[in-house]
Image (cartoon, grey):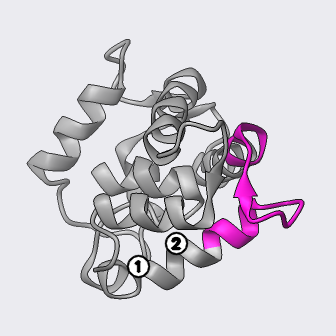
Amino acid sequence: MKTLFTLAALGLALTASAAAAQSGPSLVEAAFQRADLNNDSALSPAEFGAAREALFARADANGDGRLTLSEARALRSGGGSLRRPTREAIQSLRRIDRNNDRAIDIGEFRALGAQRFAAADLDRDGYIARGEIAAFGRSMGMGD
């Protein structure tokens, strides 16, 4: 679940898996390219937000404006799983779920996005450069 919102910020897979970790740099690069709408090699807050909003819309299977753990798990690399969520996944959901309704609403998702943008903007210039996103992906367990 930790990777869920990290990578959701980038428009990537939602949960950590061995396949995601092995192909992390290419996944991060592909997500960056998709999100960089004006091809200037930097993500503005608007581009970053748009990528996140699109992912949220795809993940929200029933269109209720909330992501349940099941909806989030269904987007993981390789599809969903029938296994019970891990303790880590449940704890991650609880940290993000400010109103304790056992789902992530769009407001909670946007707030996390703002935190992720700030964390990825290493030089604090208001944009995320290609190198910054690669470093951010590595810091979140994606790749080397």
User: Relative to 49, is 81 above or below?
Assistant: below
Residue located 14% across and 48% down the image: 88
Q: Position of residue 43 (x, y in %)?
A: 71, 52
Left or right: residue 82 compared with residue 88:
right
Task: Tell me which segment is drawn in magenta.
Answer: 31-49
Residue located 29% across and 67% down the image: 16
The residue to which callout 1 is attached is 24
Which element carries disc 2, helix, strand or loop?
Answer: helix
Residue 63 visible here = yes
At label 1, the amino acid type is Gly
Question: Picture quarter containing residue 65?
Answer: top right
Residue located 52% across and 32% down the image: 109
Asked if residue 47 lies in the magenta stretch, the reply is yes
- Judged from this view, the residue extending furthest toward the left is 87
Residue 1 visible here = no
**Crowding at mark 1 (Cα within 10 Å: few <14, some 14-19, many 20+):** many
Residue 28's label in the rendered image is: 2
Q: Position of residue 79 (x, y in %)?
A: 44, 75
Which corner quadrant holds the C terminus? bottom left
User: Relative to 78, is 72 above or below?
Assistant: above
Question: Picture quarter containing residue 130?
Answer: bottom right
User: Relative to 122, is 94 above or below?
Assistant: above
Left or right: residue 91 compared with residue 26:
left
Looking at the image, do the residues carrying marks 1 and 2 touch, with CB atoms under 8 Å apart?
Answer: yes
At label 2, the amino acid type is Val
**Separation of disc 1 and disc 2 at Cα?**
6 Å
**Crowding at mark 2 (Cα within 10 Å: few <14, some 14-19, many 20+):** many
Residue 77's label in the rendered image is: none
Q: Position of residue 48 (x, y in %)?
A: 68, 47
Q: Position of residue 92 (x, y in %)?
A: 24, 39
